[in-house]
């Protein structure tokens, strides 16, 4: 993790060097080990540096080639360094001290705009091309490394965080209502917008080119939903997953400092911790950080965490997740995140990161977003029914009985009818059935049956103004009758993942830590999407290929656990035990601050009902979103006048 920032006056005005310095100063937390800047004519760019590996310690940023043709500022970690070195036909062996930014610069000089296609790893970089008098920027395939920008006819600005761009005091700070709508509904499809209309995100797997006349973004990579893996047998698939996952973890362990692993006890984080222990150098210090809840036993996963520690040999550090409230240090959190974007259990990760920093880590491994990458195999039963594979379908549903206690007969018959018999029935017979059974059909649910689906808790004029209802209807229509692979592709390609990564990355940067995510490995994601659905879900066991492939390194109680732990009670107890007074005193004011966006009648009484424990899970989520958005508005966090 480092910080990049830059400016380009498209009207030819000479760059103001003090602006670049202000941008770097406000990003100091991202790179405490040094800074550098370059400027010339209408353009300038700068870097702040966090040292993790030997290549970073030797790095001088920004860097340029001998002729000063191109200058690069980069926040990057490349995983295919040797491969790039050979392709670039550089003289001599690749030195461990050779910075990743140098490889990016040489790749641009060799392959131009196509260079990001050849890079494996996490990166956000900007190159000022002196000859072409333009900026070329790029972001990694999943958006692990952030880059924000502003572009007008006169000015182009970019930075690793929004607060860097806001150092230009003349910038328009009008809020983007579509972002506010996404936040309040939890609907994240747009990968580019922020809470400010004048500031955008560069979407994952995209490049950006801007000169004095033109501005262009372009996608350079995407997952292929049509590709299907062809293995000679299932064991070959298991072995390839094992190889790719081990490599995804191994290449993210590159650090001269201790490496921590965020361990929840779930399948994803446990797999990372166990494999990291198996592939790490003996000289490397590894440890895990976990939140435990001794006072909330229904949420406590200590037994899984202890099983992983015993199996892997990693030293486990435990943090009492119930010791502080959700609103602890909320001003500092919102300052770092730049937007009112924080999950209602975000305080758990915040506490774990703080503990990791105290233990000397500069690198943390995290299991985001294993669920999407590996896939639950949702839709497999529907595919079996459509193909008429009734025996396999019955076996799959029987697995659900033994694992979850689900009755088999009714869902089996429903699938047989919907995907087996109904499509094969003559149209005239279907009309007769409708006439005979019409009176017995269940009525349609009322329009306001589920506020999470209808968004009745929001101001109707606001919803119409931002067009969210129509967008939701279009997306729902596209989701109908899609295959399991299409569903997998939509999930891993959605705007939800970049949003989560932005949140995670900004929280880690608050503690001078770089977060590395094995499940956001390009080769691993391509493989998992192409895996046959029968290996994603087997006898109702989701993510089957990972469970089976890593069965030798995972504790059995983890590899076979069927469900995640519901942490809703952690959220409830945190507010009751730590935030009750603030919630009671401030919630009404928060609702007042966001009145233009919500239906105040819907939220009336939320505070009192919460104190009685009368809010359901949906209402708890809505209460949290409205509270944190209102606090952001009222505290004027967007002025960025707080210390870092």
Image (cartoon, grey):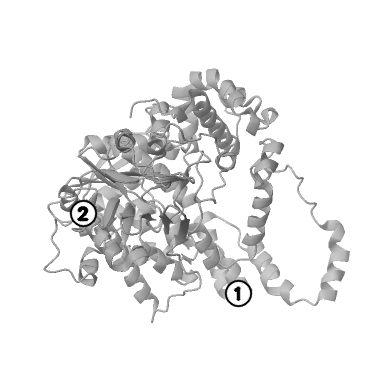
Q: Is residue 463 left or right of residue 132?
A: right
Crowding around mark 2 (Cα neighbors within 10 Å: few <14, some 14 to 19, many 20+) is some
Say which mark, if any, is on residue 254. 2
Q: Label 1, on which residue?
A: 390
Q: Is residue 179 left or right of residue 567?
A: right
From this view, report whether residue 214 is shown above or below residue 535: above
As rendered, which of 131 and 537 lies closer to the eye? 131
Percent across and percent down for residue 381 are 57, 67
Q: Which mark is residue 319?
A: none
Of helix, strand and loop, which one carries label 2?
loop
Residue 298 in the image: above or below residue 267: above
Q: Residue at x 45, y 62 (%)?
A: 219
Q: Where residue 320 sits: x, y (%)?
A: 34, 32
Q: Residue at x 61, y 22 (%)?
A: 608
Q: Secondary structure at mark 1?
A: helix
Q: How many marks?
A: 2
Q: Quadrant of the C terminus?
A: top left
- Residue 24 visible in the shown view: no
Q: Position of residue 426 (x, y in %)?
A: 80, 77
Q: Residue at 60% x, 32% y: name it.
A: 615
Q: In the figure, residue 506 lies in which quadrant?
A: top left
Res 606 quadrant in image = top right
> Considering depth in this image, is 394 or 463 the residue closer to the camera?
463
Q: Are marks 1 and 2 in contact (CB under 8 Å)?
A: no
Q: Does residue 117 lie above or below 194 as drawn?
A: below
């Amino acid at each position: 993790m480092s910080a990049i920032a830059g400016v380009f006056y498209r009207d030819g005005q000479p760059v103001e060097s003090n602006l670049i310095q202000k941008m770097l100063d406000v990003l100091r937390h991202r790179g405490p080990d040094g800074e550098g800047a370059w400027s010339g004519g209408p353009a300038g760019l700068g870097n702040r540096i966090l040292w993790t590996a030997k290549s970073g310690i030797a790095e001088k940023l920004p860097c340029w080639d001998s002729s000063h043709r191109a200058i690069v500022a980069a926040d990057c970690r490349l995983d295919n360094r040797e491969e790039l070195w050979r392709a670039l036909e550089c003289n001599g062996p690749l030195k461990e001290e050779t910075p990743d930014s140098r490889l990016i610069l040489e790749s641009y000089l060799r392959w131009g705009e196509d260079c990001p296609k050849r890079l494996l790893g996490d990166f956000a970089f900007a190159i000022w091309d002196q000859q072409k008098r333009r900026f070329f920027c790029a972001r990694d395939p999943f958006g692990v490394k952030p880059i924000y920008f502003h572009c007008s006819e006169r000015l182009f600005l970019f930075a690793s965080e929004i607060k860097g761009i806001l150092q230009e005091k003349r910038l328009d700070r009008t809020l983007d209502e579509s972002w506010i709508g996404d936040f309040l509904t939890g609907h994240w499809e747009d990968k580019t917008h922020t809470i400010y209309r004048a500031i955008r995100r560069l979407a994952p797997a995209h490049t950006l080119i801007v000169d004095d006349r033109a501005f262009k973004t372009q996608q350079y990579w995407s997952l292929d939903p049509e590709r299907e893996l062809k293995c000679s047998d299932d064991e070959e698939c298991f072995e390839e997953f094992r190889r790719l996952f081990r490599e995804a973890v191994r290449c993210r362990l590159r650090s001269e400092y201790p490496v921590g692993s965020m361990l929840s006890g779930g399948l994803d984080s446990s797999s990372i911790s166990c494999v990291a222990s198996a592939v790490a150098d003996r000289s490397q210090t590894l440890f895990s950080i976990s939140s435990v809840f001794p006072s909330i036993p229904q949420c406590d996963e200590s037994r899984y965490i202890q099983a992983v520690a015993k199996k892997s040999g990693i030293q486990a550090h435990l943090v009492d997740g119930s010791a502080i409230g959700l609103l602890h240090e909320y001003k500092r959190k919102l300052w770092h995140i730049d937007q009112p974007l924080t999950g209602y259990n975000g305080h758990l990760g915040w506490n774990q990161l703080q503990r990791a920093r105290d233990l000397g880590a500069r690198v943390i491994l995290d299991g985001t977003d294993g669920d999407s990458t590996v896939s639950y195999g949702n839709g497999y039963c529907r595919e079996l029914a459509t193909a008429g594979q009734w025996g396999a379908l019955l076996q799959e549903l029987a697995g659900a009985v033994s694992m979850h206690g689900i009755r088999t007969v009714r869902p089996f018959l429903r699938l047989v009818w919907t995907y087996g018999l109904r499509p094969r029935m003559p149209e005239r017979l279907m009309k007769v059935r409708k006439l005979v059974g019409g009176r017995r059909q269940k009525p349609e649910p009322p329009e306001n049956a589920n506020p999470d689906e209808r968004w009745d808790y929001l101001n109707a004029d606001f919803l119409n103004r931002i067009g969210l209802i129509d967008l939701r209807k279009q997306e729902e229509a596209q989701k109908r009758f899609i295959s399991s692979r299409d569903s997998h592709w939509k999930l891993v390609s959605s705007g939800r993942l970049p949003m989560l990564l932005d949140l995670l990355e900004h929280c880690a940067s608050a503690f001078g830590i770089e977060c590395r995510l094995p499940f956001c490995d390009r080769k691993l994601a391509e493989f998992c999407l192409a895996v046959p659905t029968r290996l994603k879900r087997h006898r109702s066991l989701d993510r089957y290929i990972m469970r089976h492939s890593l069965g030798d390194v995972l504790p059995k109680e983890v590899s076979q656990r069927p469900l995640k732990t519901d942490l809703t009670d952690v959220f409830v107890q945190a507010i009751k035990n730590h935030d009750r007074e603030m919630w009671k005193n401030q919630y009404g004011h928060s609702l007042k601050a966001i009145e233009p966006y919500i239906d105040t009648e819907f939220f009336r009484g939320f505070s009192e009902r919460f104190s009685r424990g009368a809010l359901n899970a949906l209402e708890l989520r809505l209460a949290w979103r409205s509270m944190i958005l209102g606090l952001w508005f009222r505290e004027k966090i967007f002025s960025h006048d707080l210390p870092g």
